[in-house]
Amino acid sequence: MQFPLYFDNNATTQCDPRVIDAMLPCFGARYGNAASRGHTLGWQAEEAVEQSRTQVAALIGVEAREIVWTSGATESDNLALKGVAEAYAGKGQHIITVATEHKAILDTAQYLETQGRRVTVLPVDANGLVDIGQLADAIGPDTILVSVMWANNETGVLQPVAEIGALCRERGVLFHSDATQAVGKIPTDVQSANVDLLSMTAHKMYGPKGAGALYVRRRNPRVSLAAQMHGGGHERSMRSGTLNVPGIVGFGAAAQAAREDLAADAARTRALRDTLERGLLAAVGGAARVNGGAIERLPSTTNISFDGLASDALMAGMPDVACSSGSACSSASISPSHVLRAMGLSDAAAHGSLRFGVSRWTTEEEVEFVIGRVAQVARKLRALTATPKAMALR
Ligand SMILES: *Cc1c(COP(=O)(O)O)cnc(C)c1O
C-alpha cells in the first residue's frame, strides 16, 4: 500500500497512465498551437484537439461541435450561467438553482443577482433532493434557466435530472447541469435527460487539471451563449484563448478510458464503497449515519456523520489517510458544509462528517486499513473527551 491512502477522489483524481501517455507528446515534439493554420505543427495540434472533442462528446452522447473547451468546471459553470443570463436578457431575468450546488454555481448566481437578475435557490429534503413540484411552481414567465447538478460532490446524491429536464423542456426553459462528479462515473446521457448545457472537468475523471468543457446544445433548441472571454474567436467565439492542447488531449484520453471502463469501474467502486460504509458504521462506536444513504448516489462516494466526533480531529489523527471533512469544500474556510446544512444537519453533525471517495485503483486491502484506522482514532478521541483529566489538560 502506498501512503497516504487516497480516498479524496471527489476533490481530484490521479491521472490514468493512458492519459499521461497521450499527453506526453504534446509537451515534446507536438507543441503546435491548434489555431495555427499555416503549418503541420498547427494542423497536428488541431487534429488532436478535434479527436478529443469527439471522445468527450461520445461519452455524454452529443455531437463534437457542441463541446466548448474551458479551463475546468468552474469556468464552465460561469460561462453557462453568465452566458445564458446575458444572451437571454431580453427574454427574462430569472434563474433557478438549488441550495446544494457547488460554489461555482451559487457564487455565480449571487453575482448575477448583483447585476439585477432574480435568483431562486430551492431547498432540498433530508436526502439532498430537490422537489419537482416546488421547481415547477418556481418557474415563471420570466424564467430563462434552471441549473441543477447531476451528482453532488459532497454526498454523491443524484438529482432527478431526467424529470427536471422533461419539466424544463415542457415549460420552454433552458436546463443546465453541473455534471462534474457524474461524467465518467455513471451514464450521463444528455439526450434522454433533455440537458441543454452541461459542465464537466477532466481532473475529476482521471484526467489532468485545468481542462474542462461545456456542452452547449445546437439543435432543439439551439442555445445562444454570450462569450465571457473575448479575444481570438476560438471555440466558435464562445471562449477565446489559445487551447490547452496537452490538457485537452488528456481529457479526450480520460473520456475514452471512461467509456471503456465505466461499467466495470462502477461495479468495483460500488462494492468497495459499500464495504467501506458498512465497515465504518460497524467499527466506529456510537451513532452514525450515511448522508443521502437512503437514495441513489454515485457508486464511489460516501459521506458519514459520526455523532460526538469532530471530523477535523479524526483527520488529524490519521495522517496516513487522505479524505475530506464535512467542513466547507473551500479549504480556506472552516464553516460547516452548506450541502449538509441544507439537508438539515446541525452544525455539529456537519462538523462530524467525513467524505470518502474510492477510485478505479482502490483495493480491498486499503478499504480494510481505513476502516481500522478510523475506528482506532475514534476510540482514542472518545476516550479523551470522556475523561475529566483529559478535559483539564485541553
Ligand atoms: C470540482 C467541481 C467543480 C469545479 O471544477 P474545477 O474543474 O476544479 O474548476 C464544479 N462543480 C462540481 C460539482 C465539482 O465537483
Image (spheres, helix red, strand yellow):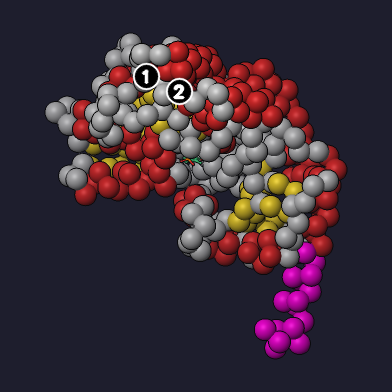
Label 1 sits on residue:
36
In percent of width and height, residue 242 lies at: 37, 29
How would you rate the neighbour count of disc 2 (Cα within 10 Å): few for under 14, some for 14-19, many for 20 or more? some
- The Cα atoms of the two marked residues, 1 and 2, are separated by 7 Å
Report the side of 41 relative to 184 (left or right). Answer: left
Report the side of 328 relative to 146 (left or right). Answer: right
Label 2 sits on residue:
32
Residue range highlighted in magenta: 377-394
Please tell me in which quadrant of the rendered image residue 300 appears: top right
Query: From where the camera sits, is residue 136 visible?
Result: no
Amino acid beneath label 1: Ser
In percent of width and height, residue 160 lies at: 49, 29
Q: Do callouts 1 and 2 mark residues in contact (Cβ within 8 Å)?
A: yes
Q: Which residue is rendered at x = 30% and y = 48% of the image?
A: 110
How would you rate the neighbour count of disc 1 (Cα within 10 Å): few for under 14, some for 14-19, many for 20 or more? some
Q: Which residue is rendered at x = 45% and y = 23% of the image?
A: 32
